[in-house]
Amino acid sequence: MTFTEDFYLNSIEKLSSLSDDELIHSFNKEVGNLGWTSTRGAYLSALNDAISQRNFKGTPLIIRGGRMSIKRHISLRNNQLELV
């Protein structure tokens, strides 16, 4: 297993254990960050998967065709994602 694969698995495990609010906070911390490394890509992939697994209403606001957009902050109200 590569370092990046291991990092992804560790990230998905940590993100999956977060509360909904903590997960949304983790997403919002990435908005506006233009830096890129392979570990950040693995983390964002894990974040995408963790959010997708929650089955929030409105997920297509940030995830379309399996790709996640981190252009805008989001909030969660009554299990509904909203752009802020």
Image (spheres, helix red, strand yellow):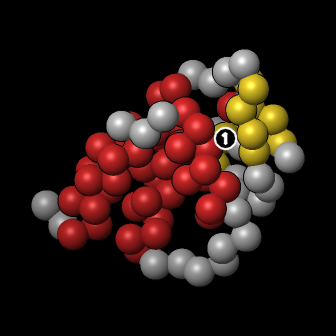
Report helix, strand or loop for mark 1.
strand
Residue 44, image x, y percentages: 50, 57
Residue 51, visible in the rendered structure:
yes
Give the residue drawn at x 53%, y 43%.
Answer: 23
Above or below 58: residue 12:
below
Above or below 44: residue 47:
above
Q: Nearer the viewer, residue 80 or 3?
A: 80
Give the residue drawn at x 75%, y 39%.
Answer: 75
Q: Nearer the viewer, residue 60 or 27?
A: 27
State left or right for residue 45 relative to residue 59. Answer: left
Q: Nearer the viewer, residue 31 or 1?
A: 31
Give the residue drawn at x 46%, y 78%.
Answer: 37
Residue 84, image x, y percentages: 86, 46
Residue 79, image x, y percentages: 67, 21
Give the residue drawn at x 57%, y 22%.
Answer: 55
* Residue topped by disc 1: 63
Residue 17, image x, y percentages: 36, 37
Question: Crowding near pointer 1: few (<14 within 10 Å), some, many (20+)?
Answer: some
Q: Amino acid at mark 1?
A: Ile
Name the quadrant of the N terminus.
bottom left
On the image, which quarter does residue 71 sit in? bottom right
Residue situated furthest left in the rendering: 1
